[in-house]
Amino acid sequence: MTIAPDIASVVTTRLTDPGAIRRAAQDRPKFERSGFSRPLFILAADHPARGAIAAGGNATAMGDRHELLARCVEALARPGVDGFLGTPDIVEDLILLGALDGKLVLGSMNRGGIPGASFELDDRFGSYDARGIAEGGLDGGKILLRVDPADAGTAETLIGTANAVNELAERELLALIEPFMSVRENGKVRNILTPDAQMKVNNISAGLGRTSAYTWLKVPVVDEMERMMASTTMPTLLLGGEGGADVDAMYASWQKALEIPHVRGLIIGRTMLFPQNGDVAGAVDTAVSLLGRGAQ
């Protein structure tokens, strides 16, 4: 259902009829539950809300909302794209544009961990909450969980994550946890991308909340993926991260990891929206082809 025919009209709608956002969200055609039977491709664009606006070698690439929306609309229109992950601002923009009709939509919940901040690992829940996700007709929420035993702020994030899992489960909504073991080095938080570290934090994540019935994980591709993935029975999506210079190697690593049975798809952002060659459609089509779903 398209309310704003173009990006310029989004601003006009927000100015003259803000209630249209709620109406459009309620009327939006929803994702068919049968879609969970296939490997999923979900586009992610929740990075800007915590100040992470660099992509593709450009320090402010994701900071231009008009350009970001145009790229999201292009990517979401490609065959085989199942869903979207974002914060309320960009989700609502895309709903007005009609780009999320029939899509699986996940709301990003904790964006308080601003990169470089002294409180970065005390990652507060200041974006979507479970009530907003339910009222907005979304399918679930995403939580970033970085665990640093040396940072006391981790405790608040752990409790916040458990509470979010509980509140989503009460509403039978998916809780997608993106977990990392992390360490602060020279004032900068670094995620520890080793199999052993990921196994440890996967177990921590799965145990949060009073039920894990609606919990999924979002994990990085690391060495020894089969051994790492043996650490969980949660349905799992692979994240793309920042990519790298060797695009072919990146795609090959995703394809190999997708062979693991409970890896249920890809949830990719910057490497799709700002690919090295600038071809958004081509990047998305290549990633979707890795899912092995045949003709769409």
Image: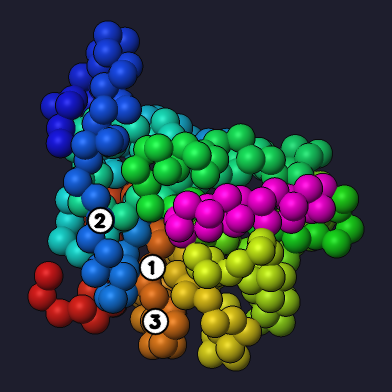
Local crowd size for mark 3, using a 10 Å CA cut-off: few (<14), some (14–19), many (≥20)? many
Span highlighted in magenta in the image: 153-174
Q: Report the number of numbered marks.
A: 3
Q: Is residue 266 left or right of residue 162?
A: left
The location of residue 54, given as percent across then percent down, is 50, 42
Q: Is residue 159 one of those drawn in magenta?
A: yes
Residue drawn at point x = 67 percent, y = 79 percent: 199
Which one is earlier in the sequence, the residue at label 3 or at label 2?
A: 2
Q: Amino acid at mark 3?
A: Leu
**Which residue is denoted by mark 3 in the rendering?**
258
Q: Is residue 173 magenta?
A: yes
| Figure check: 57 above or below 169 | above
Q: Residue at x 39, y 75 (%)?
A: 264
Q: Main secondary structure of the magenta part?
A: helix
Left or right for 92, reference 192 = left
Q: Secondary structure at mark 2?
A: loop
Between circles 2 and 1, the one closer to the viewer is 2
Q: Which mark is residue 31?
A: 2
Q: Residue at x 58, y 69 (%)?
A: 212
Quadrant of the image containing the N terminus: top left
x then y, percent, for residue 211: 61, 67
Q: Residues within 10 Å of mark 2 (few under 14, many from 20)?
A: some
- Which residue lies at the image location 48% right of the left edge and 73% below the top edge? 236
Splitting the image into 4 quarters, where does residue 195 fall?
bottom right
Name the kind of residue labelled 1 in the image. Answer: Leu
